[in-house]
Image (cartoon, rainbow, N blue to C red):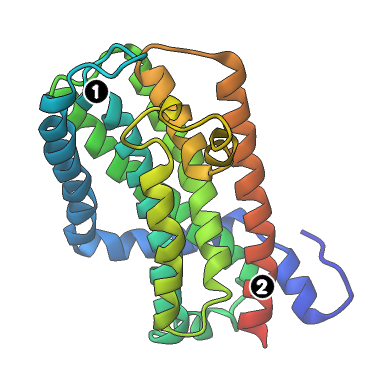
């Protein structure tokens, strides 16, 4: 591919190639294959949430008002969405930050033909794959527990890929601003409230009317809507289209920021 001639750094940042990206993905997959521990913990945590909150609180709630499904079936798609979010986001924040700050992996990669954009695309793609693996395992657990109330739940797989892209790109963009490990506490100040308030455990109608637009603006809310609605056998075209366009725009904007800032950081 051709590059700009403004400067070598700009040119290297602006170009990418599928072959080089696939090499980085293959490298990451080889590392994941050596230990199933991260994948296992990424699966065990959401299953524990489903068992303790879904079934535990579900015995007190019964059917969700206005939705008319059992509480565990209502929260399962939302937990799946948060699982993809956490898996993809953590991989491109903590994982990438380790490779920048501690392992200095990219110092050995940058002198090769691989560009910072290759690295950005490869890391995001690796995170999406990891999120898909975790979400597929959780989806199997949901089916075994008898919580698959509609064939539409199969659409959770392609939806998870889009959710993973959006949050993996966002995580990489955030990582370019991190200075030290203490900055990860600031991330939790955003991620935890979003997890609690983005209708993970109760419907949007729980909130007063003036607050609902703010909740709907959260990326996790749109992710949950994209997975939950088809999983419950409902297909509101407008809402699903909004969620898809929102996540594409969110992920694409984050990817632009991540690529530009990662390039400056690695080539400095």
Q: Residue furthest right?
A: 6
User: Badge 2 is on which residue?
Assistant: 261
Using the image as rendered, state which of residue 59 and residue 172 is in the foreground: 59
Residue 187 x, y percent position in the rendering: 45, 66
The residue shown at (39%, 70%) is 94
Judge from the rendering whether residue 126 lies leftward or rightward of residue 46; answer left or right: right
Q: Residue at x 14, y 44 (%)?
A: 48
User: What is the spatial separation of the Cα atoms under label 2 and label 1, in whole angstroms?
Assistant: 41 Å
Left or right: 164, with 114 as reference point: left
Q: Quadrant of residue 57?
A: top left
Which residue position is annotated with label 1?
73
Q: Is residue 238 visible?
A: yes
Q: Is residue 141 left or right of residue 245?
A: left
Q: Position of residue 1 (x, y in %)?
A: 76, 59
Query: What residue lies at 61% left-to-right and 24% top-to-bottom?
Result: 241
Report the side of 224 relative to 122 (left or right): left
Frontmost residue, 16 versus 113:
16
Q: Quadrant of the C terminus?
A: bottom right
């Amino acid at each position: 591919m051709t590059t700009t001639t403004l400067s070598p750094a700009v040119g290297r940042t602006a170009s990418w190639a599928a072959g080089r990206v696939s090499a980085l993905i293959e490298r990451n997959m080889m590392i994941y294959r050596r230990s199933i521990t991260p994948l296992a913990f990424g699966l065990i945590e959401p299953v524990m949430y489903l068992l303790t909150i879904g079934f535990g609180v579900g015995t007190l709630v019964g059917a969700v008002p206005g939705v008319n499904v059992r509480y565990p079936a209502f929260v399962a798609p939302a937990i799946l969405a948060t699982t993809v979010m956490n898996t993809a986001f953590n991989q491109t924040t903590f994982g990438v930050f380790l490779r920048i700050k501690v392992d200095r992996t990219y110092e050995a990669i940058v002198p090769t033909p691989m560009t910072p954009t290759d690295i950005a695309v490869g890391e995001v793609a690796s995170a999406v794959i990891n999120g898909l693996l975790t979400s597929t395992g959780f989806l199997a657990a949901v089916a075994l527990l008898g919580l698959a109330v509609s064939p539409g739940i199969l659409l959770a797989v392609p939806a998870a890929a889009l959710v993973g892209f959006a949050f993996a790109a966002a995580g990489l963009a955030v990582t370019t601003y991190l200075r030290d490990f203490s900055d990860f506490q600031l991330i939790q100040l955003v991620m935890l409230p979003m997890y609690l308030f983005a209708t993970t455990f109760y419907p949007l109608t729980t909130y007063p009317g003036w607050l609902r637009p703010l909740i709907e603006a959260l990326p996790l809310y749109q992710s949950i809507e994209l997975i939950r609605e088809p999983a419950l056998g409902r297909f509101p075209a407008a809402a699903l289209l909004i969620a898809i366009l929102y996540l594409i725009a969110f992920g694409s904007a984050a990817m632009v920021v991540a690529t530009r800032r990662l390039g400056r950081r690695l080539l400095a």
